[in-house]
Amino acid sequence: MLLAAARFKECGTIPETMLKGLVWNKYNTTIGILVILLLCLQGLTVLLVPVLNTPHETGYKSKAMEENSVILQRSKKKLLEDLLMYKTKIQNAHTMDSSGTYMLLPNLIVPAGDKASASNLTICTQTTANHLHNLQDLTSVWTGPVSVTVFTHGFKAAHDLYTIVYYHSCFTNIARMVTFHIVYPISNPPQNLSSLLHVELRCDNHIKHSAYEENLNYASNIPYPHNVLRNIAITNSVSAYVLVIDIDLIPSLDLYSQFQQFVKRRTRSKSGSQERIVYVLPSFETNSDNVNFTKKSLLSRWSSGSVRPFYATACEKCQLQTDYELWRQVPAVSFLDIAYQVEWDGIWEPFYIALKEGLLPYDGRFKQYGFNRISQVCEMHLAGFQFAVFNNAFVVHQGFKEKSGFHSAKDEENRRNKELYNLLKHELKDRYPESNRHC
């Protein structure tokens, strides 16, 4: 017993009187051993906690720490100055949307370099701050500029701004490629922005949102204005072409450089750059952790069942017109080109690349779920646009979309937006009286 006690004593500091009492009291032997074990565990905890909380001592580095070369070169003073500048811009905002409902702050944070101005294709997207983590995956595959509009309001705004600055400051690709715009409802402006001045920005200790809920955008009592946000992202992009997608979609590998070559070939062949044509990217969803695909690897995963067309079970008609089986059979070539053309029909809502000049704006009346993209594609159809499907390019969503996975108010929102869509179709007849097309 003495030998055991002596060994336990090495684990931590044990009062001498307690040790003696525990050793010589034959009635307390069992209790003594338990107490000594607890003291040992406590001592080990004190020793190990600092090690576990110090990444560089264990060899572990978070993704943020690996990619934070930008933040490491910037002083705390500079970060505080940036936060003050962004705070002032938000408080002094004076540009409203055409409906007078939202305040717009375009180009709140711009890329650190001039990559965007030298590009001919920008991804345009929109989100709330809780989904900005998707930019990490997006910019690990996409090598061109990104224009993203973030929707915020009220007391959320301080944390949302902190989150924007965190991603801009702590991830090199995001800092170099992403332009951030902010939109908020005039009826619920940002509150308590001064609290930002008391928060330390650290790339290894981001104060994350409570959860990355899939449908948080729809759960707020303030309607989410997809189309207003999309228009801001498009209007403030600086490239000739735009790719309008949701923030949780990933383009196929090497799409950016392939599209540059496609435009060069098309220009040399004198295929008029002002044609009313958009380039459709078939969209898919996968239950695999990997979303970085070439067409070859995508087709392989499609055959195995881990990849399927987007909305295959949630809304098959929404993507049916793309004709996935035809696309699947297009002969493989090493370059990007038009595979075939399709006619608009039904409730088709493709993702596509289009010339920014002449692209019809999205109707800002559509909010929450349903018909927000369908309405814009319908008008493009009436206006005479052609829809050409690319052979090798596509986008992928991580996770399968199921009907049961939508928020509870989805059906009611969809019903209201369908009524608005029917109204819009009557308006479009007056807007395009000479068109022989219809929606």
Image (tube, rainbow, N blue to C red):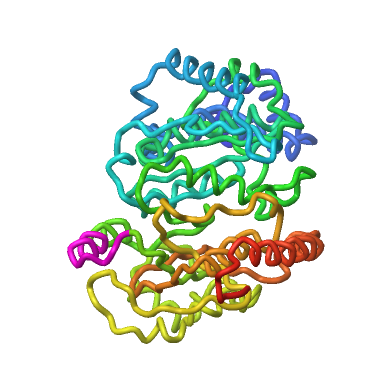
Residue at 44%, 47% (x, y): give it: 136
In the rendered image, the residue lying farthest to the front is 434
Q: Position of residue 307 (x, y in %)?
A: 49, 75
Judge left or right: residue 131 versus residue 359. right
Between 56 and 10, the one lying in front of the other is 56
Using the rendered image of the protein, determine whether residue 7 is visible from the camera's viewpoint.
no
Between 296 and 114, the one lying in front of the other is 114
Quadrant assignment for the N terminus: top right
From this view, report whether residue 306 is shown above or below residue 63.
below
From this view, report whether residue 252 is shown above or below residue 241.
below
Residue at 51%, 33% (x, y): give it: 106
- How many numbered marks, from 0 up? 0
Q: Position of residue 359 (x, y in %)?
A: 47, 55
Judge left or right: residue 293 versus residue 134. left
Residue at 63%, 23% (x, y): give it: 14
Q: Is residue 59 magenta?
A: no
From this view, report whether residue 33 is shown above or below residue 336.
above
In the rendered image, the residue lying farthest to the left is 268
From this view, report whether residue 436 is shown above or below residue 175.
below
Q: Position of residue 403 (x, y in %)?
A: 70, 71
Residue at 44%, 59% (x, y): give it: 250
Magenta stretch, residue numbers:
262-273
Between 144 and 2, the one lying in front of the other is 144
Using the rendered image of the protein, determine whether residue 174 is visible from the camera's viewpoint.
yes
Quadrant assignment for the C terminus: bottom right
Q: Quadrant of residue 7?
A: top right
Q: Position of residue 374 (x, y in %)?
A: 61, 65
